[in-house]
Amino acid sequence: MRIHGAIHDGVTRATRRVRGLPALAALAAAIGLAAAPAGAQDSGNGFLFGVPHSTFTIRTGYDRAFANSDLFSYVTRTYTVNKSAFSSPLLSADLGFRVNRQIDATVGLGYSRAVARSEYRDFVDNNNLPINQTTEFTRIPLSVNLKAYLGPRGQSVGRFAWVPASFTPYVGGGVGTMWYKFRQAGDFIDFTTNNVSSDALASSAWTPMADAFVGADYTLTPGMALTGEARYSWAQGPVNDNYYSGFNRIDLSGLSVTAGLTFRF
């Protein structure tokens, strides 16, 4: 029951800090709650009476989008929006499996979504009113990583008990895939006719990605740790030629800083 309560509280706090991410929060909570009974029932090899063999981590923080491709340059030059508008809060979850004393294999899922409202910098409509748009930028990375701890994660005491280290830094990296969506909706100028009309333009795709990260676990209880992490993600995606003809691949890379809870099973 204590494990269920800790996981529920951790998921609730993370979800409140990053509004608008209900789907990932629900998925993360489901994974954690599903894993908890297995760890609690395995009294011989659980986190209290043996070395933990799996972890579940949920983190929230901020993802700074680099936004370095020519599509972002065009948008920031044409509309009243800056590159910083494409950065956003991030919610992520990782499921880890022990490989050996220092290495874990992890599967990670993240979600970030930025929304920026803007108008044309140099044009107004026939009534001298601004021409408005809304731009959305969503990224969902899914990755498989190796995580290497830089010190002992804990020590066995006697035949059964295992005591976690109070502070354990780690580094890691891996590969995966990222889904993105870049969408603009509102009023736009057709520069061939100078007419203003409403439209919705969108580009989305799955594309390969790679990441590298550094972080640390600070033990709160034998079965739970506070985790902080900085992660660099690299990805570039194809753009929809129907709406964004002539642009190169969109830059999906970013640097995130997050904190959350890790549960040991």
Image (cartoon, grey):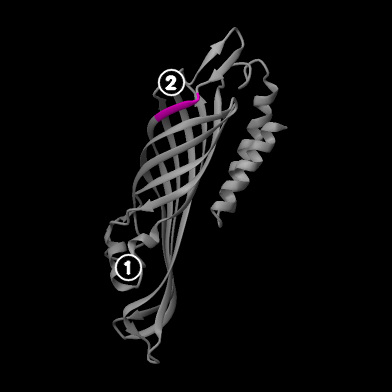
Query: Taking 186 as reference, is 155 above or below it?
Result: above
Q: Is 116 placed left or right of 73 in the picture? A: right
| Residue assigned mark 2 | 102
Q: Quadrant of the C terminus?
A: top right
Percent x, y of residue 50:
60, 16
**What amino acid does circle 2 point to?**
Gln
Residue under the point 46% across and 44% down: 258
Is residue 144 left or right of 235 when viewed as pictured?
A: right
Check disc 2: other Cα within 10 Å, few if <14, some if 14-19, many if 20+: some
Front residue of 220 and 136: 220
Circle 2 — which element?
loop
Q: Secondary structure at mark 1?
A: helix
Q: Which residue is mark 1?
A: 75
Residue 107 is labelled as none
Which portion, as a residue range, is magenta? 166-170
Tell me what residue is drawn at x 42 percent, y 47 percent. 178
Residue type for callout 1:
Val
Magenta stretch: helix, strand or loop mostly: strand
Please, is residue 151 above or below residue 24 in the view? above
- Mark 2 or 1: the one toward you: 2
Mark 1 Cα shell of 10 Å, populated few (<14), some (14-19), many (≥20): some
Between the residue at mark 2 and the residue at mark 1, the CA separation in whole angstroms equals 45 Å
Pick out the residue farthest to the bottom. 127
Quarter-of-image position of residue 234: top left
Q: Residue, x 65% and y 31% (percent of image)?
A: 36
